[in-house]
Image (cartoon, helix red, strand yellow):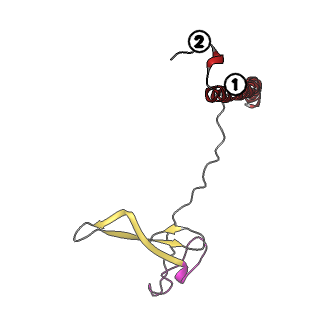
Amino acid sequence: MVFNDMDDLKPEYKELIDKLSDQINDLFSILHYYQGIIAEKEIKIAQLSKENSILKSQIRDLSQISKPPTFPSQKPYIPPAPKRQVVSPPISSEDPRINKRVCPECGATGFAIREIDDKSKILTYTPRRIYAKKKTCTKCNFEFSN
C-alpha cells in the first residue's frame, strides 16, 4: 500500500520518520564539521609547503656559498716519509751467543727484541713452508735482520 499523503501514516511510522530525519540532520552537521576541519588542514598544508620550498631554496643558496673554490692545478703537499736504513748489528769478536738480541736503532736488548717470520723470504717449501726470521724492537718498532 502506497501512501500519497503523509497524514494517512500510522503514528509508529511518523515517529520512525522523525527519528530518521533527526539522525540525517545530525549526520549532515557532522559532515559540515569535518569538511571545515579538512579545509583548515588543506590551508595549513599549503602554508607549510610554501615554507618548505622557501627553506629548500635558502639551503641551496647557502650550500653554493659555503663551498670553497677548488683549483685543479694545485695538489695538496704530502711530506715524504722518512727513510730508515736497515742496519745489521755490529759484529763482535766475542761469543756469538752473548748479546744476540740487540736493537741497532735504540740499543735495547734481551726480551725487548721479538723474532717474527719474514714472509717475503721463503727458505723452503717442503715439508712445509719455512720462512726466514727478522727481528723487531718492541720499544722503537725498528725491524732488522741478521
Residue drawn at the location 45% of the way across and 87% of the way down = 95
As drawn, which residue projects farthest toward the top? 4
Query: How many badges with numbers are in the image?
Result: 2
Given contact means CB atoms under 8 Å apart, are the residues at marks 2 and 1 in contact?
Answer: no
Residue 1 rendering spot, x and y as whole percentages: 50, 17
Q: Which mark is residue 4?
A: 2
Q: Which mark is residue 28?
A: 1
Residue density around tag 2, few if under 14, some if 14–19, many if 20 or more, within 10 Å: few
Compute the Cα span from label 2 to label 1: 27 Å
Q: Quadrant of residue 7?
A: top right
Residue 115 rendering spot, x and y as whole percentages: 45, 75
The answer to whether one can see residue 70 in this image is no
Amino acid carrying mark 2 in the image: Asn
75, above or below 123, in the image: above
The answer to whether one can see residue 80 in this image is yes
Residue drawn at the location 76% of the way across and 31% of the way down = 66
Disc 2 vs disc 1: which is toward the camera? 2
Amino acid carrying mark 1 in the image: Phe
Please tell me whether mark 2 sits on a helix, a strand or a loop: loop
